[in-house]
Image: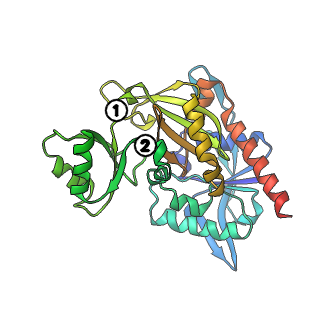
């Protein structure tokens, strides 16, 4: 069995932290041969979708109480080969946001491959439609008060109604560009003009949730079913809890409310072909649905004592085998 991972350049991946590396390791453990390429290496050729990919051999990594310890180098690359995507049992699209032109074109090529029977995780069309911030709007009953607008007057009215809000750029990741604003702050209209690029780009405004100081829970789901969760607690004096901006991961369990949210999302995620997803929950409220390259596997393995990547891989392969039988 062969699996292809489309990611950012290997030099940017942090093996002790990166969920893509955890999934590669899990693929090896499951008996698959791992291949790697950047999405820009995809190509349409003679009616087929191909990729210039390299086989990877991954070095063993030690799991310690402090986390994963990765050797340097942590991988060895084989010679690149031009290969049809039809030769891979699973193709993982794991390039980080932003969803720019390069990402969009790669997703378009992957959608062509999917039509030819290639199993792509996650479904390329859904990667483009399910924006990390906007996709949660399908479930307003699960969210804190939220609006999306480019018009400053509309945003001002929302802020005055809720007094204290968070503003999120729709193309952001890892907490980048997220700011807190209040109706009483000086220069509020100027701030809104800045974050909307003079009312040309919509932003998401959401009522600030004070219990974010207790953490922002990342729940990982496969085929709509939870694998586990970690809590991400913000630094002192900070409201953003993303690990990329210094949040501290903690072990945690799923609450009854968390299970309610997961059940509400399960069938829509399955219909959309979103097999591996990370949702963010603050207190009782759904915040985001992360579909491009969900993170948290390493922290879940380290803190929760769960072989999370292996569980994800097993469920994905079982799903692929089931769908393969259904197609015959």
The mark found on residue 239 in the picture is 1
The mark found on residue 272 in the picture is none
List x then y, in percent, for residue 143. 44, 43
Quick check: can you spot residue 181?
yes
Nearest the viewer among 277 and 254 is 254
Can residue 15 be seen by looking at this rendering?
no
Q: Position of residue 48 (x, y in %)?
A: 70, 74
Q: Residue at x 69, y 41 (%)?
A: 312
Residue at image x 20%, y 49%?
191
User: Image quarter for residue 151?
Assistant: bottom left
Q: Quadrant of residue 116?
A: bottom right
Where is residue 211? Give x, y as percent: 39, 28
Earlier residue among tags 2 and 1? 2
What element does badge 2 sit on? loop
The residue pinned by badge 2 equals: 174
In the displayed structure, 146 sits above or below 248; it is below
Q: In this view of the protein, which residue sits in the foreground, 177 or 134?
A: 134
What residue occupies the far left of the structure in this picture?
186
Residue 220 lies, with reference to residue 49, above or below; the image says above
Residue 183: x and y, percent?
19, 41
For label 2, count other residues whose C-alpha is less than 10 Å away and answer few (under 14), some (14-19) or many (20+): some
């Amino acid at each position: 069995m062969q699996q292809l991972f489309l990611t950012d350049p290997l030099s940017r991946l942090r093996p002790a932290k990166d969920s893509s590396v955890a999934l590669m390791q899990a693929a090896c453990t499951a008996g698959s041969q791992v291949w790697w390429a950047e999405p820009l290496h995809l190509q349409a050729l003679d009616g087929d979708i191909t990729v210039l990919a390299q086989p990877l051999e991954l070095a063993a990594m030690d799991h310690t109480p402090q986390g994963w310890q990765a050797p340097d180098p942590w991988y060895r690359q084989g010679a690149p080969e031009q290969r049809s995507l039809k030769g891979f049992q699973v193709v993982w699209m794991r390039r980080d946001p932003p969803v720019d032109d390069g990402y969009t074109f790669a997703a378009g090529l992957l959608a062509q491959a999917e039509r030819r029977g290639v199993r792509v995780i996650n479904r390329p069309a859904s990667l483009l439609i399910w924006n990390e911030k906007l996709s949660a709007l399908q479930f307003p009953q699960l969210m804190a008060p939220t609006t999306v607008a480019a018009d400053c007057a509309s945003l001002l009215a929302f802020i005055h109604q809720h007094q204290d809000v968070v503003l999120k750029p729709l193309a952001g990741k890892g907490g980048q560009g997220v700011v807190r604003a209040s109706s009483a702050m000086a220069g509020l209209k100027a701030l809104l003009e800045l974050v909307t690029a003079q009312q040309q780009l919509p932003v998401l405004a959401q009522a600030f949730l004070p219990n974010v100081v207790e953490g922002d829970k990342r729940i990982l789901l496969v085929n709509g079913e939870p694998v586990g969760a970690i809590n991400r607690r913000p630094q002192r004096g900070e409201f953003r809890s993303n690990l990329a901006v210094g949040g501290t991961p903690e072990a945690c369990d799923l609450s009854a409310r968390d299970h309610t949210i997961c059940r509400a999302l399960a069938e829509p995620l399955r219909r959309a072909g979103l097999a591996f997803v990370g949702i963010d929950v603050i207190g009782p409220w759904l915040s985001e649905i992360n579909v491009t390259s969900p993170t948290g596997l390493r922290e879940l393995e380290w803190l929760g004592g769960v072989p999370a990547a292996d569980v994800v891989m097993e469920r994905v392969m079982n799903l692929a085998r089931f769908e393969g039988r259904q197609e015959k």
